[in-house]
Amino acid sequence: MSFVLDTSVTMRWFFGDGKPSDLAYAGKVLDEMKKSSAFVPVTWGLELSNVIARAESKGLVTEARSGAFLEMLADVDIEVDTSTFLHSMSDTLQLARRFKLSSYDASYLELALRSGMPVATLDEDLRKAAKKAGVKQFA
């Protein structure tokens, strides 16, 4: 089953922290990626890079650990939606306004709505917005 992958799940793989239920969910998502594709908006890479750079600058992780994580990501099937930009100043903006989301989070919701795929996220605001918008949660 293909789905939209949010950075909140990806970063649980990197940091390995959070509630046990969140870690179990992130593990389930990663297991599913061995069988199917995850789709991300084009902003996903920027979000990921931002979190990694900030964690390194705070001394939370080393550059070597980040590099190993990025190598792991290169081995899973992640498809980048190049149409994200085309929708950013229309549909995505409207979703951000309607659900009071960041434009980054709204881009995941927009992709899920446009593609009809469920969204895999640990972000509570995005989960609530997805439910209100009729988008299924990856379970």
Image: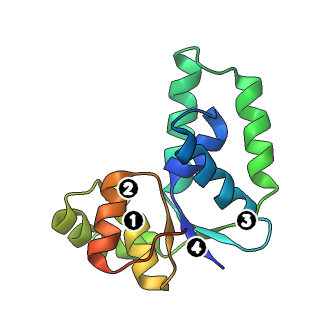
Q: Where, quadrant-wise, is the N terminus in this rendering?
A: bottom right
* Quarter holding residue 12: top right
Per the image, label 2 sits on a secondary structure element best described as helix
Q: Along the polypeptide, which appears first: circle 2 or circle 3?
A: 3
Q: Are marks 2 and 3 in contact (CB under 8 Å)?
A: no
Q: CA distance from mark 3 to mark 4?
A: 9 Å
In this picture, residue 16 sits left or right of residue 120:
right
Can you say whether 128 is above or below 70 in the image?
below
Pointer 3 residue:
33
Say whether disc 4 or disc 1 marks the residue closer to the N-terminus.
4
Which element is circle 3 on?
Answer: loop
Check the picture and name the quadrant holding the C terminus.
Answer: bottom right
Structural crowding at the residue carrying mark 1, measured as other residues with C-alpha within 10 Å and reported as few (<14), some (14–19) or many (≥20): many
Residue 130 position, x and y percent, is 34, 70
Can the viewer see residue 34? yes
The amino acid type found where label 1 is placed reads Ser
Residue under pointer 1: 107
Q: Residue 124: x and y, percent? A: 35, 52
Mark 2 and mark 3: Cα distance apart in space: 22 Å
Q: CA distance from mark 4 to mark 2?
A: 17 Å
- Residue 131 % position (x, y): 32, 72
User: Does the residue at mark 3 contact the one at mark 1 (Cβ under 8 Å)?
Assistant: no
Q: Which residue is mark 2?
A: 104
**What residue would you read off at disc 4?**
3
